[in-house]
């Protein structure tokens, strides 16, 4: 049986405990708490795809916080959030290049026959399934808008 993302996170948590890596351990515990919360709320065992969704949501939240902390001139808090983003990203698949994202967007638009911004939902539905975890969906959404507004 292959190891799941959850198994890897749990193993890394144990390693961080043994190595007395306080900051890494704190970030991993946040991840585990988010996963457990979703499993308890929905009474399910999360799949790797669902775990990737949680990780992406956590990264998005931290990026939003980073922007606010930068505006508020709080470099100390920015550093904490950046460190957490870096740790969370270790559990995501390799990110696609901008060229690969553009290619995927173009193919999705062609396959759905989308021609205007009102078709964006169909295109994003396909792309979310294909690119979840492998690309920043905010960037993907912007690319779709750009292509459909031409």
Image (spheres, helix red, strand yellow):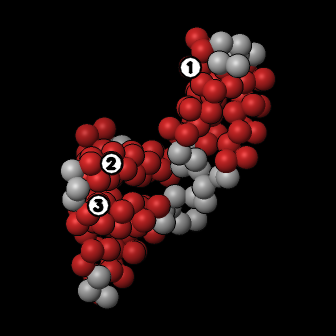
| First reached walking from the N terminus: tag 3 or tag 2 | 2
Residue of label 1: 121
Residue of label 2: 67
Tell us which disc is closer to us: 2 or 1.
Answer: 2
Seen at 33% across and 48% down, the residue is: 67
Seen at 53% across and 66% down, the residue is: 3
Secondary structure at badge 1 equals: helix
Asked if disc 3 and disc 1 are in contact, CB closer than 8 Å, the reply is: no
Please state if 134 lies on the left or on the right of 40 as rendered: right
Tell us which disc is closer to us: 3 or 1.
Answer: 3
Seen at 29% across and 60% down, the residue is: 78
Image position of 56 with respect to 109: above or below: below
Secondary structure at badge 2 equals: helix
Q: How dense is the environment of label 1, judged by Cα within 10 Å: few (below 14), some, or many (20 and up)?
A: few
| First reached walking from the N terminus: tag 2 or tag 1 | 2
Separation of residues labelled 3 and 2 (CA atoms):
8 Å
Which quarter of the figure has residue 140? top right
Asked if disc 3 and disc 2 are in contact, CB closer than 8 Å, the reply is: no
Separation of residues labelled 2 and 1 (CA atoms):
27 Å
Residue 54 visible in the displayed image: no
Q: How many marks?
A: 3
Asked if disc 2 and disc 1 are in contact, CB closer than 8 Å, the reply is: no
Image position of 22 with respect to 142: above or below: below
Residue 108 visible in the displayed image: yes
Q: Observer-nearest residue: 90 or 43? A: 90
Residue of label 3: 78
Q: Observer-nearest residue: 104 or 65? A: 65
């Amino acid at each position: 049986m292959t190891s799941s993302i959850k198994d890897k996170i749990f193993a890394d948590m144990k390693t961080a405990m043994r190595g007395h890596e306080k900051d890494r351990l704190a970030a991993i515990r946040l991840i585990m708490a988010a996963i457990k919360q979703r499993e308890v709320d929905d009474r399910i065992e999360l799949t790797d795809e669902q775990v990737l969704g949680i990780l992406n949501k956590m990264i998005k939240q931290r990026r939003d916080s980073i922007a606010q902390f930068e505006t508020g001139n709080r470099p100390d808090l920015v550093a904490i959030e950046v460190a957490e983003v870096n740790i969370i990203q270790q559990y995501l698949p390799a990110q696609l290049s901008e060229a690969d994202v553009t290619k995927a967007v173009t193919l999705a638009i062609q396959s759905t026959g989308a021609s205007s911004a009102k078709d964006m939902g169909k295109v994003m539905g396909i792309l979310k399934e294909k690119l979840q975890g492998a690309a920043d969906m905010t960037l993907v959404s912007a690319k779709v808008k750009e292509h459909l507004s031409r």
